[in-house]
Amino acid sequence: MSLRLLAIAAWSGTGKTTLLEQVIPLLKARGIRPGLIKHTHHQMDIDTPGKDSYLLRKAGADQVIVASNQRWALMAETPDRPLSLMQLASQMDSSALDLVLVEGFKDEAVPKIALWRRGVKGKVEDLLDQYVIAVATDEDIELNLPVLDINQPMQVADFLAQWLKKS
């Protein structure tokens, strides 16, 4: 079985991470095993300068796995390749997950919940495409899609649980 992907799409400052922080434990409490892929536009490094893994990666290893009994992480250098959401998702263990939530990648062809707050940027319609299955907002708006309360993470988790059952 392939992984189910669902993106949370919004402009910076809308509250994507905040909502996911609240929804993930609610999904886990329902027995849903979520994973997460987060896209960032910022320079990032999860390794620690001076540690062996950092030194070996800087020496030229294109992929490094750091592992302990509690967790492991794969670091891959991708300077000349655009990031592919499907490639990243394929790195995840589908036998251990029921759903992969995606923060960012708002232009990808995957199901999405669009988050919108008036005054953050643009109009809600600017976020809508054929892949949006619901909108979470703090405004009372009429759409031909389910409208969720962005400030009610339980409502969003309920929607996701129902969506997983149907699909």
Image: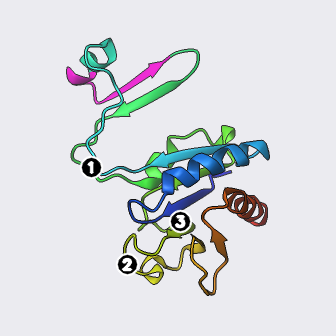
Q: Residue at x 27, y 23 (%)?
A: 57
Query: Marks 1/3: CA distance?
Result: 21 Å
Q: Are marks 1 and 3 in contact (CB under 8 Å)?
A: no
In reply to whether residue 65 is colored magenta, the answer given is yes
The mark lying in front, picked from 3 and 2, is 2
Q: CA distance from mark 1 to mark 2?
A: 30 Å
- The residue beneath circle 3 is 110
Quadrant of the rendered image containing residue 29: top right
Percent of width and height locating residue 116: 49, 71
- Residue type at the position of mark 3: Val
The verdict on residue 143 being magenta is no
Give the mark nearer the N terminus: 3 vs 2.
3
Residue ID for mark 2: 122
The region drawn magenta spans 57-67
Label 3 and label 2: CA atoms lie apart by 22 Å
In the image, is 139 to the left or to the right of 159? left
Residue topped by disc 1: 81
Q: Is residue 35 above or below residue 167?
A: above
Q: Residue at x 26, y 19 (%)?
A: 49
Q: Residues within 10 Å of mark 2 (few under 14, many from 20)?
A: few
Q: Position of residue 145 (x, y in %)?
A: 64, 81
Image vertical order of residue 120 relative to residue 7, above or below: below
Residue 122 found in image quarter? bottom left
| Relative to 25, 31 lies left or right | right
